[in-house]
Image (cartoon, grey):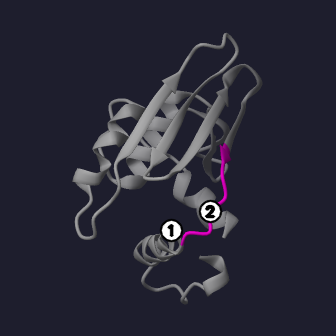
Amino acid sequence: AGQRWFDLCQGLRGCVYLSGSEEGGGKYELAPTLETTTAALGALLGLKLRTIRDLEALPGAVGGAPMPAVWVEVDRTMSDREGFSLRVGQRSLSVVLKEISNHAFVQHARTRRDHFKRAARACAAEWHAPDAPPLPPQAL
């Protein structure tokens, strides 16, 4: 699964990479900046995102089942890092990007809500390659 994720994230348009090369198998380590994160999310979601705040329009861009509101707050108040908070319905996470040390991390609260599990399964099934074997339930 890890290799598939690296393959998926290689060579995304508008992204800056820290590691890898076109000759050596592809660029694979994304730079920890808001601009690169925005470009990567836009490419992976199939959306045109000018800024990370454009994720707030996601519920209107997704067809089918209703989606809770999305809220994004950008934080550039620290001199050595930037980041954003993302809330979808009752769930939230914080993304911290430290370009100076080439480090990024995400903090989130755990939930036991069944509708998030169903949404994750549906999303994984839709993104799963049609010719690959089915994903086991524990992977979802």
> To which quarter of the image does residue 135 belong?
bottom right
Q: Residues within 10 Å of mark 1 (few under 14, many from 20)?
A: few
Tag 2: residue type? Thr
In the visual, does 96 lie left or right of 43?
A: right
Q: What residue is pinned by disc 2? A: 111
Give the amino acid type for the residue marked by disc 1 in the picture: Phe
Rendering quarter of residue 64: bottom left
Residue 51 visible from this viewpoint: yes
Q: Residue at x 49, y 25 (%)?
A: 74
The image position of residue 132, as x and y in percent, is: 52, 85
**From the viewer's perspective, is 137 left or right of 41?**
right
Kindly identify which residue carries mark 1. 116
Residue bounds of the magenta highlight? 107-113
Figure check: 92 above or below 104: below
Numbered tag placed on residue 90 in the rendering:
none
Secondary structure beneath dot 1 equals helix
Residue 103's place in the image compared with 21, above or below, is above
Residue for point 67% across, 10% down: 79
Asked whether the beta carbons under mark 2 and mark 1 sit within 8 Å of each other, the answer is: yes
Residue for point 43% across, 35% down: 72
Q: Nearer the viewer, residue 83 or 68?
A: 68
Residue 106 within the segment the image draws in magenta: no
Q: Residue at x 56, y 17 (%)?
A: 76
In this orientation, does residue 14 appear? Answer: no
In terms of secondary structure, what is the magenta stretch mainly? loop
38 w.r.t. 122: above or below: above
| In magenta segment, residue 109 | yes
Task: Relative to 25, say whether 106 is above or below.
Answer: above
Residue 56 spot, x, y in % from top left: 33, 41
